[in-house]
Amino acid sequence: MSALKQFEQVWTRENATTRKVLHAIPDDQAEFKTSPNVKAAREVAHIFSMGQGAMLAALDGSWKFPPSFPKAPATLAEVRKAFDESTKALQGALAKAKEARMDEKVMFMTGPKQPGEMSVSTFCWFMLLDTIHHRGQLSIYLRAMGAKVPSIYGPSADEPWM
């Protein structure tokens, strides 16, 4: 299987799980924080769309460094809409992308205060793993706010498999 197809398959599966977690945030808990110095649930959830937008830009050649990420939308409904829109856009970009693009280079941070080149493939995987990381962060928010935590890689207390 090509690197592009492998990424597309994993991203498709992970995207569906991310969508479940995003939609598990109760509408009245969008501004929930686990402590004063962290982002609100709405802001954490917005990271999903930014990552997908970055992957799209890397795949279609429009990525610019340093990136200019937009602020989180004002409402959870807008965050969810942006996620769905970025999902559709990335699906289209993955369907059109050529395998050779995965080996081309983009500039991104490779360490603290250290920009460097990496392949589009590495960049896309980095962004997907960052989404998974923030999805885990959001699952902790869900538990702390008393919301139901969906199954992610296995059953949860709120979504058992048996």
Image (spheres, rainbow, N blue to C red):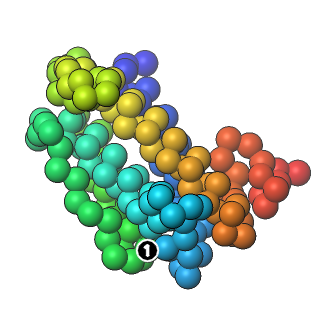
In the current view of this chain or complex, which residue is farthest to the front? 36
Which of the image's four quarters has the N terminus? top left
Q: Is residue 60 visible?
A: no
User: Where is residue 76 drawn, in percent x and y?
Assistant: 43, 74
Q: Identify the residue at image location x=68%, y=41%.
A: 153
User: Where is residue 138 drawn, in percent x and y?
Assistant: 56, 56
Q: Identify the residue at image location x=64%, y=63%.
A: 142
Quarter of image, res 131: top left
Dot 1 falls on a residue whose secondary structure is: helix
Which residue is label 1 attached to? 76
Q: Is residue 151 left or right of residue 162?
A: left
Quarter of image, res 140: bottom right
User: Where is residue 98 drawn, in percent x and y?
Assistant: 21, 27
Residue 113 against residue 20 in the figure, above or below: above
Q: Is residue 127 left or right of residue 37?
A: left
The amino acid type, in three-letter code, at marker 1 is Leu
Q: Is residue 38 left or right of residue 100?
A: right
Residue 73 against residue 114 in the figure, above or below: below
Q: Nearer the viewer, residue 12 or 110?
A: 110
